[in-house]
Image (cartoon, grey):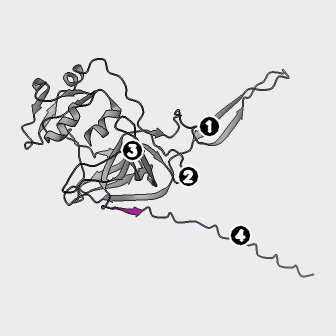
Amino acid sequence: MDPQIVVPFGGIVVFSGGAPDNVALMEATDLVKVSENNAGSAFFREPSRSAPHNLYGRTAELFSRGGTPVPPVPQFSYVGVPDSNSTVPTATTTTVKSKSKSKSKKPLPTTTTTAPVPFTGEAVSQFHVNFASGYDVTYVWDPALGWKRFSQTSTPFLSATSPPVQISVTNVIVNFIPYGGGGGDGNMIGTGTSWIFSNGNLIKGTWTKANDADSTHYTDAAGAPIRITPGRTWVELLPLDKTVDVVAAPVPPTTVAAPVTTAPKAKKKK
């Protein structure tokens, strides 16, 4: 399914080795293929990590092999960003009249601001994606960072920088897709269920993809495009027989003001 993932982006695909069938599928695409076989100088091994998970690339050299960079078409619909298929939902419009000391009878100019509707669904505090044991992950919502990623043992995923920082993303999309038996390839062509996590909320929708070159489209129960929060987005491709465990966000306590009571005034004695 690698071509189904990368073809919509165009440009360069970088890899090292792979199953012969999958490599053949990738070679059949129009993408610029860069591997250790044709660009060995663009790769290096990080000695502090264990092979084979210590292979890294020199980004500038990898990009130099792809010709003039061309931005890919947008892969998602975003809150506050119009696209060719639909208009952007907006919240209440606020109109402010300008103040003027002029004695002119001309109408005063106004300033209109319109806020985009944020991503809103079921409030979620965390969720666990049940891949096979050892590959499952948990995401915990943090209003300041987004979705923080943790391993099966609740160990935070940290960057390799010094000091390390918590790895987090703005959006997580879980697409339920069919896989072949015995660990075979997944299929992203067609349609299926999608759970989209953004802004501390979950919307359960549908993913649709017509062919390898088509972007994946996400719609809600009414068929409208699902708009996610602008930012880094990860897509998890989960087998149909696996599940996602969701922990709802705690309901904030409600404060009810006590009724104001007034004691009756005592009557004055005559």
Which mark is on residue 114?
Answer: 1
Tell me which secondary structure the magenta stretch mostly adopts: loop
Instruction: Name above or below for residue 164 compared with residue 65.
Output: below
* Count of marks, rendered view: 4
How many other residues sit within 10 Å of disc 3, few (<14), some (14-19) or many (≥20)? many
| Residue 222 marker | 2
Q: Residue at x 53, y 49 (%)?
A: 223
Where does the image place residue 269, in percent across and percent down from the top left? 89, 82
Which of labels 4 and 1 is toward the front? Answer: 1
What is the distance, in whole Å, between disc 4 and disc 2 at their CAs?
A: 45 Å
Which region shows up in magenta?
Answer: 242-270
Residue at the right extreme?
Answer: 270
The alpha-carbon separation of the residues under discs 4 and 1 comes to 38 Å
Instruction: Tell me the quarter of the picture where residue 37 sits.
Output: top left
Q: Amino acid at mark 3?
A: Thr
Residue 68 is drawn in which quadrant?
top left
Question: Which tag, 1 or 2, sits closer to the chain's start?
Answer: 1
Between residue 181 and residue 202, name the one nearer to us.
181
